[in-house]
Amino acid sequence: MQLPEEKQSWSLDKRDPLYSHLALVTMPRAGFEVKHPDFEVRPLGVGQEVYVYKEQESEDLFVCKFFGSRWYLSEKERPDGLNYEFKNLNTLRNMGFYTFPQ
């Protein structure tokens, strides 16, 4: 997967809580080993919800979707929204996206 060149990118700050999660949890679970990960970050699309994180040494890619505060949703709509996203995740898994990349 190529990162779109026209999108602005930046380096993920090592003090960002997501850095620790990607480096210490996500990468090892995915079977990737990099001693000092360095992540380039780019938005996917025009919103501020979905980003791709590319580890520079290994070139491993991770896509992260953020939900943030959805103050406009009712108490009933919030769980419905998460269930919708979980359904989408299962749809992708049923399409064959359920194993680690080769």
Image (tube, grey):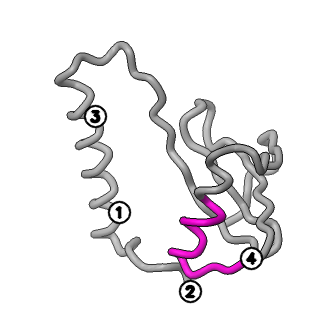
Q: Give the farthest residue toward the bottom.
A: 102
Above-or-below relation of 69 to 53:
above
Mark sitting on residue 102: 2
Left or right: where does residue 101 sit relative to residue 76? Answer: right
According to the picture, the residue beneath numbered tag 1 turns out to be 92
Image position, residue 61 (x, y; %) = 65, 65
Left or right: 99 in relation to 74: right
Q: Which residue has dot 4 on it?
A: 34
Distance between mark 4 and mark 3 Cα atoms: 35 Å
**Predominant secondary structure, magenta span:** helix
What crowding class fits label 1: few (fewer than 14 Cα within 10 Å), some (14-19), or many (20 or more)? Answer: few
Marks 1,3: beta carbons within 8 A: no
Label 3 Cα crowd, 10 Å radius (few <14 / some 14-19 / many 20+): some
Mark seen at residue 81: 3
Question: Residue 48 falls in which quadrant of the image?
Answer: top right
How many angstroms separate mark 4 from mark 1 (CA)? 27 Å
Indicate which disc, 4 or 3, sits on the residue closer to the N terminus: 4
The amino acid type of the residue labelled 2 equals Gln
Examine the structure image and report whether residue 69 is included in the region drawn in magenta. Answer: no
Considering the numbered disc 1 on the image, is that residue within a helix, a strand or a loop? helix
Magenta span of residues: 22-34
User: Foreground mark, 4 or 2?
Assistant: 4
Q: Say what amino acid the circle numbered 1 marks.
A: Leu
Q: Residue at x 56, y 86 (%)?
A: 102
